[in-house]
Image (cartoon, rainbow, N blue to C red):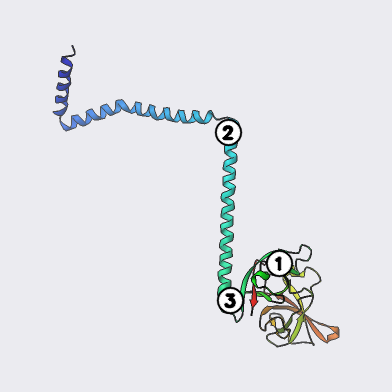
Amino acid sequence: MHYWMPGVAMAVALVLLNLPPTAADRLKVGVSALFIPLFGLNRSTQEIADSASYSLLTRSTLIREVERLRRENYQLKLSAAQATDTLAENTRLRAAIGWQSRTPWKGRAARVIGREPTTWWRSVLIDFGSLHGAQTNQTVITPEGLVGRIRSVQPAFSQVALIGDPECGVSVVINETREPGTIQEARTASLGDGLVTMRTLQHSPTAMAGQSVSTLGNGGVFPKGIPVGQIVDTRSVDGGLSTELRIRLGAPLNRLEEVWVLTP
């Protein structure tokens, strides 16, 4: 019986080889249709096996997996936030470097690292100390205007007295009228709205809102011409003998992040 099977196979092969092209194509389609259910069954079996593997996981394992994914999501969000902060800082520093190259003053960048919790409007700490060359009375500014002066120095940091602090007296002048005056002590947290008080040496009827104020340069600490701010409003005081002006500061003292310390 086995002797005639090779002969049958050869006869079938000869028939298939001699079939017309149309008949051969139909035969291929028919044979493929016979095996398609088997391929579908194989895929279904694999999907069932994958689902079964998940269903076999314990509840504690699933909880741990969820927690792991939550931690990864938190880390990704944190990294994205840090990248955004870094980009913003780089943008500020690039702008400050460009500004510093156009000013007549030489300076060193420093970062604000702390504030006094009860008198935050009077001083800040910067990461610039005696190890970096810091000295008392050095002027501290931003591209927007005057910040204050270094009051005390430690090896790794310094304390800066801000405009409005009683230890940071500033002689200023109204640029448009050349009327001199001084910045008064801020007794409350008025710097939260960016305002300080200036008083002229005599009555100044020509002072008005919108005019700009800068350092006068005759106090021995602050160089001449550093922008301070703009006049918001004025009023007569001391029976009309002098004028008091509210100045909106250019430097954002309530949200300082980077400053420049002027060097000789």
Amino acid at the residue labelled 1: Leu
Instruction: Judge by depth and name the residue closer to the eye, 247 or 4.
Output: 4
C-alpha distance separating marks 3 and 1: 22 Å
Tag 2 near tag 3, CB within 8 Å: no
- Give the left or right position of residue 25, taking residue 41 as reference: left
Q: Secondary structure at mark 2?
A: helix
Q: Position of residue 102 (x, y in %)?
A: 56, 79
Number of other residues with Cα within 10 Å of mark 3, as a class: few under 14, some 14 to 19, many 20 or more: some
Image location (x, y in percent) of residue 194: 72, 71
Name the residue at the top extreme: 1
Q: Quadrant of residue 228?
A: bottom right
Callout 2, which amino acid? Thr
Residue, disc 3: 100
Dot in front, 2 or 1: 1
Location of residue 239 by image quarter: bottom right
Q: Going from the N terminus, do you reach mark 3 or mark 1 first?
A: 3
Please tell me the numbered disc located at residue 125: 1
Q: Residue at x 57, y 53 (%)?
A: 79
Q: Which residue is mark 2?
A: 61
| Disc 2 + disc 1, Cβ < 8 Å | no
Q: Which of 153/224 is in front?
A: 153
Q: Residue at x 57, y 75 (%)?
A: 99
Residue occupying the point 52% across, 31% down: 54
* Mark 2 or 3, nearer chain start: 2
- Residue 19 spot, x, y in % from top left: 15, 28
The residue under label 3 is which amino acid type?
A: Gln
| Mark nearer the viewer, 3 or 1 | 1
- Name the quadrant of the N terminus: top left
Judged left or right of residue 106, residue 215 is: right
- Give the SS element for disc 3: helix
Q: CA distance from mark 2 to mark 1?
A: 49 Å
